[in-house]
Image: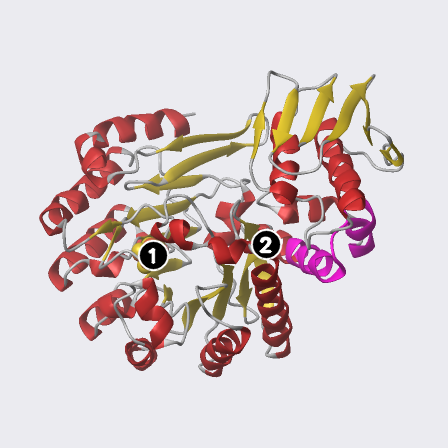
């Protein structure tokens, strides 16, 4: 079995990240050894001496990696970079994102002087290096428009009409929990009110997400939105998004309410334009209902609409993905977010996804994304934010695309970890950013019923986090 011996350091997380990338599962043995379950038996030494990292494989003189002397790379990142290099040479295999296993490749891309540097130093494939390099620059220019002390606010409604089988978010079945919804809404309002002293008047963006907030019935939805917006002085917030994700929760009453209350941006997410796949996913709406929801939103006057699509959905071939992407692009939404299927443990589907681990499934997703990136660029969209999840098929990415002038400030501020974020509701996370102290987080509890019970505790934590 492959064994990595750590000598002079205990960077077990980066070592495990790389081993998982190549071999799937791995586990620590003692404090200085990590093993993976695979043939054949190989031993790799990952060594840190006097600040210098070197990595080599026993019995393989050619598989020795020394530091890149021109680079100012931290030992932790260098451990990962060298281990990736040794294994990729040994196995004669490269991943599209090279040694970047983290969730924010644009953080590394921001430090790079050129796309070539990402290719040569971190072994990214050329197209991924270009994507990371361009997106990092786009993120920077959007972030520069958000003053450092202006927070974003997230308000979460973690309920949906049914649970999509791939879902890894905190989301509960709104039908089974109907009795909880009014109580939940009042708890969120109470949490916001209890934090009113620490929420600055200048908020850069507000995002009402979930779950699917539009799952609330018409009356409760209006009550919720009116009160949240009043508490947050939303008439002064330059960007307000409401996640209206599922077509089965959208109607004219809710769309008009959002429009009248000043919502700028909504998300209507088809994920696919295949009724067969929608049924498999348990999304409880049809392609036709998605089109109706979109047309209604346009008639009511929404000018910034985001649509999510997922590459790698179960049993979908490349032609189906292309059909979906072409179909939603023909509607000309201002934002399209191109996701890769994630196999998170919370997802119901994670038991049935062996096929998506295969090399051919990885290649299919790679082809879908390559097509998607090129197609969207040709159609006038620019990538403006980018992140990866740990368990996406093939280690691929999620990318937000926008028509010029329609990038979502909230997405960039939240991803950047360089702006404060107030999170209200179950499963939300608040972050306070300080140029001197860095980033501090305060997560709320995930389950709605627990959140209702402990809402004052959540508010106290947030007051402590943001009190200066
Ligand atoms: S709509 Fe989104 S949050 Fe709700 S179950 Fe589906 S994937 Fe999860």
Relative to 34, does residue 218 appear above or below in the rendering? Answer: below
- The residue beneath circle 2 is 394
Does the beta carbon of the residue at mark 2 sit less than 8 Å from ligand 1? no
Reply yes or no: does residue 324 show up in magenta.
Answer: no
Disc 2/disc 1 C-alpha distance (Å): 19 Å
Callout 2 environment at 10 Å: few (<14), some (14 to 19), or many (20+)? many
Say which residue appears at 57% left-offset and 70% top-offset: 404
Instruction: Tell me if 391 is positioned left or right of 267 in this view.
Output: right
Q: Which residues are magenta?
A: 115-137
Residue 211 image point, x, y percent: 30, 53
The numbered disc on residue 443 is: none
Which quarter is ligand 1 in?
bottom left
Principal SS element in the magenta part? helix
Q: Quadrant of residue 461?
A: top left
Against 161, residue 425 (above or below) is: above
Q: Considering depth in this image, is 266 or 361 the residue closer to the camera?
A: 361
Mark 1 Cα-neighbour bin, 10 Å: few <14, some 14–19, many ≥20: some
- Dividing the picture into quarters, in which one does residue 314 lie? bottom left
Would you place residue 192 above or below residue 279 in this image?
above
- Check the picture and name the quadrant holding the C terminus: top left
Residue receiving disc 1: 165
Looking at this view, name the residue that lies furthest to the front.
Answer: 40
Protein image colouring: secondary structure
The reply, left or right, for residue 263 in relation to residue 116 is left
For the N terminus, the image quarter is top right
State the SS at label 2.
Answer: helix
Q: Position of residue 453 (x, y in %)?
A: 17, 31
Is residue 330 in view? yes
Front position in the image: 362 or 419: 362
Q: Position of residue 230 (x, y in %)?
A: 24, 51
Asked whether disc 2 touches disc 1, contact meaning CB atoms under 8 Å apart, the reply is no
Decide which of tag 2 and tag 1 comes sooner along the chain.
Answer: 1
């Amino acid at each position: 079995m492959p064994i990595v011996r750590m000598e002079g350091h205990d960077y077990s997380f980066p070592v495990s990240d790389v081993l998982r990338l190549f071999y799937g599962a791995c586990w620590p043995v003692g404090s200085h050894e990590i093993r993976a379950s695979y043939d054949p038996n190989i031993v790799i030494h990952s060594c840190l001496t006097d600040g210098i990292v070197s990595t080599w494989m026993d019995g393989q003189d050619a598989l020795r990696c020394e530091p890149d002397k021109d680079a100012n790379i931290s030992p932790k990142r260098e451990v990962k970079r060298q281990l990736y290099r040794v294994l990729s040479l040994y196995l004669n295999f490269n991943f599209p994102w090279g040694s970047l296993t983290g969730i924010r490749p644009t953080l590394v891309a921001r430090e790079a002087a050129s796309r070539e540097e990402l290719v040569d130093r971190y072994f990214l494939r050329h197209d991924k290096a270009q994507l990371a390099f361009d997106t990092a620059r786009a993120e920077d220019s959007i972030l520069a428009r958000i003053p450092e002390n202006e927070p974003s606010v997230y308000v979460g409604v973690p309920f949906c009409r049914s649970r999509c089988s791939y879902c890894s978010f905190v989301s509960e079945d709104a039908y089974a929990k109907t009795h909880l919804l009014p109580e939940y809404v009042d708890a969120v309002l109470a949490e916001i009110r209890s934090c009113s002293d620490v929420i600055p008047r200048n908020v850069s963006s507000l995002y009402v997400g979930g779950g699917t907030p539009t799952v609330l019935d018409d009356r409760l939805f209006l009550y919720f939105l009116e009160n949240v917006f009043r508490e947050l002085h939303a008439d002064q917030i330059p960007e307000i998004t409401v996640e209206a994700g599922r077509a089965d929760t959208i109607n004219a009453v809710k769309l008009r309410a959002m429009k009248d209350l000043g919502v700028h941006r909504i998300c209507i997410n088809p994920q696919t334009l295949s009724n067969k796949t929608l049924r498999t996913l348990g999304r409880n709406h049809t392609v036709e209902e998605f089109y109706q929801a979109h047309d209604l939103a346009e008639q009511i006057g929404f000018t910034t609409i985001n649509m999510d699509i997922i590459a790698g959905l179960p049993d979908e071939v490349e032609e189906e993905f292309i059909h979906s992407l072409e179909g939603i692009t023909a509607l000309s939404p201002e934002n399209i977010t191109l996701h890769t299927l994630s196999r998170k443990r919370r997802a119901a589907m994670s038991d049935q996804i062996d096929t998506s681990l295969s090399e051919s499934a990885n290649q299919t997703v790679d082809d879908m994304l390559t097509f998607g990136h090129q197609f969207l660029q040709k159609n006038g969209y620019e990538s403006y934010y980018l992140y990866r999840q740990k368990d996406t098929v093939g280690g691929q990415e999620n990318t937000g695309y926008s028509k010029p002038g329609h990038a979502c400030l909230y997405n960039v501020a939240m991803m950047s970890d360089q702006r404060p974020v107030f999170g209200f509701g179950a499963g939300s996370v608040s972050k306070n950013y300080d140029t001197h102290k860095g980033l501090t987080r305060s997560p709320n509890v995930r389950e709605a019923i627990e959140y209702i019970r402990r809402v004052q505790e959540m508010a106290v934590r947030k007051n402590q986090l943001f009190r200066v």
